[in-house]
Every structure is written in C-alpha cells, then in structure tokens.
Amino acid sequence: MNISTLCEEDSVALSHTLKAISDPVRREIVELLKSGSRSAGDIASHFNLSSATVSYHLSQLKKADLIREIRYKNFIYYEINVSVFEE
C-alpha cells in the first residue's frame, strides 16, 4: 500500500487505527479481547484506571473500528472486530 495514494477516507481510518494502537493500555485491551467478549467492568478490573478512563480507551478503539460493542439486555460487551484484522 502506497500511503501517498490513499483516498482521504482511508487516510482518516488509518490515522484512527494508528492512534488507537499507539497507546499501551489500548493494546492490552485488544490482547484481553482476544480470549473473547468482555464487559467494560471486566476490562476495567485489569487496570488501575478510573471507569471514565477505560471508557475513553474503549471509545478510541471503537472509533478506529478495532472493537465493537454487543448489547445484551442491560449489559454492553466488547469484542474484537475480526473483519478489520482480516483485511
């Protein structure tokens, strides 16, 4: 892939992806999700961070389309967006 030939939409997507994976906490969240879907509370329990901070990291990963959320009743679970990693 030649970066100079990326369309603007692809360039923005690549920028979001690179920003998302540049943070070690977000990389660790992705590692956690390799074993399956988890709730935000379960993810947060692995870190010494506030719920708001974990929520921010999850939103950045969602913005980059690296993870997706699954709503089940009153719960939200997060899982890896496998299709992104297949591309």
Image (tube, grey):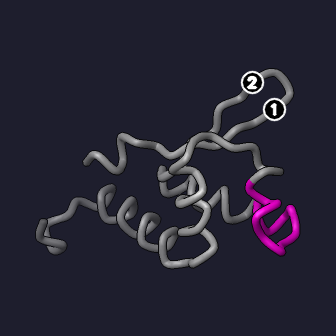
Looking at the image, is 18 positioned above or below residue 9? below
Whether 53 is among the magenta residues is yes
In the depicted view, which residue is nearer to us: 61 or 46? 46
Disc 1 residue type? Answer: Phe
Q: Quadrant of residue 4?
A: bottom left
In the image, 3: left or right of 55? left
Task: Check disc 2 and report the residue beneath it.
Answer: 72
Whether 51 is among the magenta residues is yes
Q: Residues within 10 Å of mark 2 (few under 14, many from 20)?
A: few
Q: Estimate the spatial distance between the alpha carbons at disc 2 and disc 1, rounded to whole Å.
A: 5 Å
User: Where's residue 10, x and y in %?
Assistant: 30, 58
- Any mark on residue 61, and which? none
Q: Secondary structure at mark 1?
A: strand
On the rendered image, what quadrant is the N terminus found in?
bottom left
In the image, 34: left or right of 51? left
Looking at the image, is 54 positioned above or below residue 77? below
User: Where's residue 48, x and y in %?
Assistant: 83, 74
Task: Check disc 1 and report the residue beneath it.
Answer: 75
Residue range (magenta): 43-54
